[in-house]
Image (tube, rainbow, N blue to C red):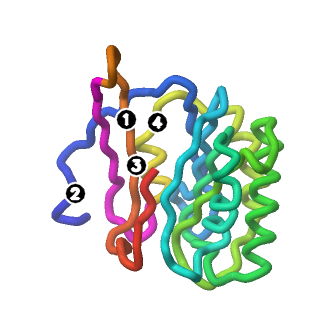
Amino acid sequence: MSPFAPASFPELPALAGIRLATAEAGIRYKGRTDLLLVRFDPAASVAGVFTQSRCASAPVEWDRERLAGGKARALVVNSGNANAFTGLKGRRAVELSAEAAADAVGCRPDEVFLASTGVIGEPLDPAPFAAHLGRLASEAQPGGFLDAARAIITTDTYPKVATRRVRLGDGEISLDSIAQGAGIVTPDMSTIL
């Protein structure tokens, strides 16, 4: 465990319209969660900032192309395999993963956003997505952000979470954030959701 790990983690409040579920899908490691499904009911407005690398991963390319649609019904994140530098196999794995998520939550594949983090250059097997996403869709619950942060860990030694309440106009909003990446801010960014 890193000496920078906090002694405790903040309690992130459940957010209306967001349900989460995680699974041990065996994408790279045994005995740890490595698959996260986030359901948005109703559809969420989407914004994104992406790496400036000209060699972006297949999930980054997928998300960039769908960002203009402005809406998401699901976000699927896996750890253990970045699905980067995987060419046509990587693009096909993204398509199959998006289709599995769309079937699981009852939406179109272009309403599914994907993120992968982990080893670079190894093809990502989409079979674990098809095997687990249906169950995750039915098990998804409000809250559970700390479990979600644990599911996206790669080389991190502890989950990274933050929450804030902010006054906006006459009301107040809650912001919950999970992040991963022990040392990958270069070439431009770690994964922050």
Q: What is the x, y in percent for residue 163?
A: 31, 37
Closest to the camera, between mark 3 and mark 1, is: 1
- Decide: is 16 above or below 92: above
Three-letter amino acid code of the residue under disc 2: Ala
The residue under label 2 is 5
The residue under label 4 is 144
Three-letter amino acid code of the residue under disc 3: Ile
Residue range (magenta): 153-167
Three-letter amino acid code of the residue under disc 1: Leu
| Residue 19 found in image quarter | top right
3D distance between C-alphas at marks 2 and 4 = 19 Å
Q: Secondary structure at mark 4?
A: loop
Closest to the camera, between mark 4 and mark 3, is: 3
Question: Which disc, if any, is residue 30?
Answer: none
Position of residue 56 in the picture relative to residue 183 (left or right): right
The residue under label 3 is 178
- Decide: is 16 above or below 25: above
Q: Is residue 161 magenta?
A: yes
Q: What is the x, y in percent for residue 11?
A: 31, 33
Residue drawn where x is 38% and y is 66% of the image: 181
